[in-house]
Each structure stands twice: as C-alpha cells, then as structure tokens.
Amino acid sequence: MVSTDGRLRRREYWHLPTRATRVLLATPDAHLLAEVARTARALGLAVSASPDLLDLDDEDGGRGVDRFFRRLARELTTAEAEDLRVATDPPDGRAALAARLLTAPTLAVELARRGVTAEIGLLAEAELWSVFQPIVRLADRAVVAQEALLRGTVDGREVGGEDLFFVAESAGWLSRLDRIGRESAITGAAAWLGDADLFVNSDPASVHRPEVDLAGTAQVLEDAGIDPSRLVVEVGEVSAVRDRGHLLSVLEHHRARGWRVALDDVAAGWSSRSLMATVRPDVVKLGRALVQALPDDGARTMVRSVVELAHTLGAQVVAEGVETERIADEVTRLGADLGQGWLFGRPVPPPVARVSAGPSR
C-alpha cells in the first residue's frame, strides 16, 4: 500500500509467544540443566527431570514461567542460553513432542521473542518501507545508483534498519526481515529508478537454501521489470567473514541470477584484503570511518591501498560517508569511482509523484 506521504509500505505481523504454563527445556549439558532446575524450583515451578530434559509446570497461570524466563535472562551467559532448547505448552504424544523439540528455538531466541532481552515491540506489528540514498559518479556527480535502506514505523515513531535487524536476529527472524528488505527495495524503486543501479543490503546468514530463499526476490525483480544486472547485493564485511564457505555459495547463486555483488564497509587490514581476493566483488565500498578519517596521512595510505587492490580485481570503488567537498576531492584524487553520503543526498522515501500504488500485500 502507498501512504499519504508517498511511502510504499507493507504491514507485517510477527507471531509472538503467549504466556505459557508448561515449559520443556533440553540440553546435553547436565550441569546447566541442574542449575536451571534449581532456579525453577526456587520460583515455585513443579519440576520433572530426566536425562537431557526438564519438564516444568506453572500452577500460577503462567506468571511463574514469566518470572523464570526473566531470572534466566539475568543469570545465564549468552553461550548457555544458546545451548538450551525450549518448547512451551508442548503437544501431547511422543511423536509430536519429538518433532516440536527438534524445531524448538534456543532459550536466547525465546527470551528475545518474549521481549525479555530485545524490544520485540519494534517488530510485533510494524509498517516497513525503504528509503533511498543516491550514489554518484565522482567525475561528474551524476547519479548512477540508489542504495535502499529499510525503515519501520512502530506506534507512530520511525525505527531505523539497524534496530529492526538487531531484534529480528535476536528473535530468530533474520531470514524473514532480510527477504522483506530485499523485496521492499525492489518494489519501492521500480516506478522511478530509471537506468540507475539498485543496491540492496543482505546478510548471507539469512539465506539458508539459496535456490529457494532467493526465488522470491528474483520473482519480485522480474515483476518490477528491473534487469537483473542492475541489482547489486551488498554484503557487510563483518557478516561475510562468519562462514566463508556459505558466503561463497550464496554469492555464487547471486551471480548465477545475473546480480552483482558489493563488499561493504571495507577497511585496509589483512582480513579485508583477504576477503576481497576471495569474494572478488564487483563493487567495493570504503568504510565510512576510513573515509571520514581523511585527510589523515595514514587514512590516505589505507584508502589508496584498498582502491588499488579493488581496481586490480576489476571492481568499482564507492566512498561512503562523503559529507564535505574536501572529502569528496580527497577520495577522487585517491582513485575512488563513486561517492555516497550527505553531500550528495540523504536517504529519502521514493518520489511521491512517481510511485505506483500496485497491489497491497
């Protein structure tokens, strides 16, 4: 749907857990299970224990379980919370129970979904849309691309993409929000993008089975009439180094569909240079912190190093965070091809006059 301010929005509802009166917790760590059992008993919950499993009942209508979750959030480490699987109000029957436990979230995810460790209200019922920031050719300042950034409205206040993705990752919904971000970018830009490229951010960890998880994005791109070669998928350096094998598998599927790849927030350390050589991106984006450190001599040396390697690999270089003419001149002299930042334009909603309503979703 299109709102009165021209934003192409989609309302999303996220299934949040209701108050539970029975909880199963499973872990192979016997010591951790014993500690959790002691906490449950101290809070008045009925505890049945068997190897690797606790079965908790709350005769206080679920209020005891709420207190139990809050206590665990304070007392357990992140690693311990990730090591426990949780099933609330499980089904009867051995087969159904086994299936539920196999797909049960970790305690860390359960706590986030219940708003114990993350502000789940950011996603409980959010209106999501994309804003767009221009990327210009430094030689003549012509706009050659737009980067899409996800935004949300929650209870009348605007929420940035960083907060949205933090909550989604905490609650185990990264894949869903990442897909929404890709599709929102495409549908939001389709009516007015023209010949410019479209940069969209994506975390490789959100794509489990590329041939399936990316099919919807490919279909939206086709429906929008945007040539696949104009889609540039940005992968952040931090997320890219988590699992290089998986990263390369995902990027192979991007390229098989005709999409290009950008490596975001690149610095000049060994890990950046190694990652660039492995990924061989089509676009390299200089990190904002590095760009804004100019004209420091050390920053100049690092920028020049990244630019030379990127050009050797056949990649274009985008300087992010360009906010002054002085920095624009610096990155141009150092060989950057493109620029992005407040000097050239801030992230804004799509142009009102050129947005097509299209079908609501």
Image: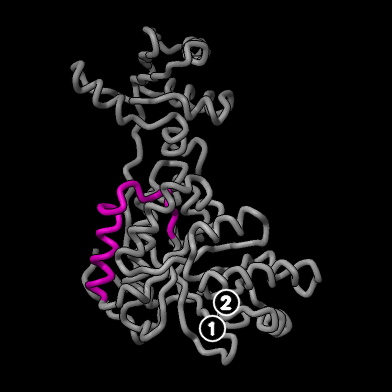
Q: Position of residue 165 (x, y in %)?
A: 47, 52
Residue 24 drawn in magenta: no
Identity, as a three-letter code, of the amino acid under mark 2: Gln
Q: Position of residue 8 (x, y in %)?
A: 34, 72
Q: Quadrant of residue 329?
A: bottom right
Q: Position of residue 133 (x, y in %)?
A: 50, 76
Residue at which label 2 appears: 340
Q: CA distance from mark 1 to mark 2?
A: 7 Å
Using residue 325 as the reference point, say whether residue 129 is left or right of it. left
Residue 183 higher or lower than 341, as above or below:
above
Q: Residues within 10 Å of mark 1 (few under 14, many from 20)?
A: many
Q: Which mark is residue 127?
A: none
Q: Which mark is residue 136?
A: 1
Residue 171 higher or lower than 326, as above or below:
above
Using residue 101 as the reference point, say whether residue 31 is left or right of it. right
Q: Quadrant of residue 344?
A: bottom right
Q: Which residues are magenta?
A: 202-224
Helix, strand or loop at disc 2?
strand
Task: Pick the quarter of the image with the N terminus.
Answer: bottom left
Helix, strand or loop at disc 1?
strand
The rendered magenta stretch, by its main secondary structure, is classed as helix
Residue 33 higher or lower than 124, as above or below:
above
Answer yes or no: do the residues labelled 1 and 2 have beta carbons within 8 Å?
A: yes
Q: Position of residue 90 (x, y in %)?
A: 27, 23
Identity, as a three-letter code, of the amino acid under mark 1: Val
- Residue drawn 66% across and 78% down? 323
Using residue 11 as the reference point, say whether residue 135 is left or right of it. right
- Residue drawn 60% across and 72% down? 320
Chain-order first, disc 1 or disc 2: 1
Q: Residues within 10 Å of mark 2 (few under 14, many from 20)?
A: many
